[in-house]
Image (spheres, rainbow, N blue to C red):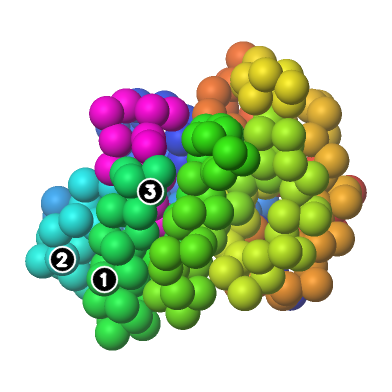
Amino acid sequence: MSQLGIQLIVFGKRGGEDLPGVLADVKAAGYDGAEMGFRDTPDTEYVELLKKAGLACSGFHTGYATFTDLETLKRQAKQLVALGGKHFMCSGVASKGWGNATIDDYKQSAEVFERAGAALLEQGVHLCYHNHQWEFYDLGDGVQGMNVLAENSSATNVKFCLDVYWLACAGEDPAAFIEKHADRAIYFHLKDGTYDSAAQKPLTFTELGRGTVPLVEATAAIKKLSPEWVVTEQDKSEIDPAESAKISAYYARTTLGF
């Protein structure tokens, strides 16, 4: 059975200022682990922090630049492995700002990810590209960035962290997209909210079960793949983050069956 994690973004700056307290809230909310980031601290201290909280590390998440520098990437992956993690998420590609990537930017990024993914596999770690809605913008003649990435990289070295909210926001059927890319889809973000799929525009982020993402259908597709981790993610919340985390965990456990 998949383990349930949470992306710490919902806690905002507190994740960096009071990580022990945040992890305590995550544990109290009912999660098995957390998706985190590299910390410039001794690996043993980081390991002890998670151990004390009674949590596992589902993975690391960072931006494109890290994957262009293999030495930095390997050093961060070493810490991830020390924490017991196997998934290294990347958001973004080579471009001048979010949503402005060209076909050539995606092709260049695919080459970077292919090299980085091969290097990570040597350490037992999977590179997982995390989608937003802008990878599905029409770049001309129906070409989409997500397809360019897939067509110019191998399913061995470049996996996907599929975010069901952003898939729905992009106008995709999350369940169908997951099934189509079953060879790459190994890690998932469960996110809810409202959006204008015709305009591919996000509107609000909500706790699970309080938005319009077809979570039940997406979950059915996810469960067929038996991923090690599914992770709740909420970019921001209008209520206390600890309470928000608890609400999403409860929905994921009871309604979605994780």
Label 2 sits on residue = 70
In this rendering, does residue 246 appear at all? no
- The foreground one among 136 and 189 is 136
Amino acid marked by disc 2: Leu
Q: Are marks 2 and 1 in contact (CB under 8 Å)?
A: yes
Q: Badge 3 is on which residue?
A: 106
Instruction: Give the vertical position of 86 relative to 197 (above or below).
Output: below
Farthest-out residue, front: 141
The residue pinned by badge 1 equals 115
Give SS at disc 1.
Answer: helix
Badge 3 element? helix
Q: Is residue 212 visible?
A: yes
Location of residue 161 by image quarter: bottom right
Q: Residue at x 40, y 43 (%)?
A: 103
Query: Mark 1 or mark 3: which comes first in sequence?
Result: 3
- Three-letter amino acid code at disc 1? Arg
Q: CA distance from mark 3 to mark 2?
A: 19 Å
Residue at 14% over, 51% down: 40
Q: Nearer the viewer, residue 128 or 247?
A: 128
Please state which of the two labelled residues, at mark 2 or mark 1, is closer to the viewer. 1
Per the model, the C-alpha gap separating discs 1 and 3 is 14 Å
Q: In percent of the image, x 75 and y 48: which residue is there?
A: 174
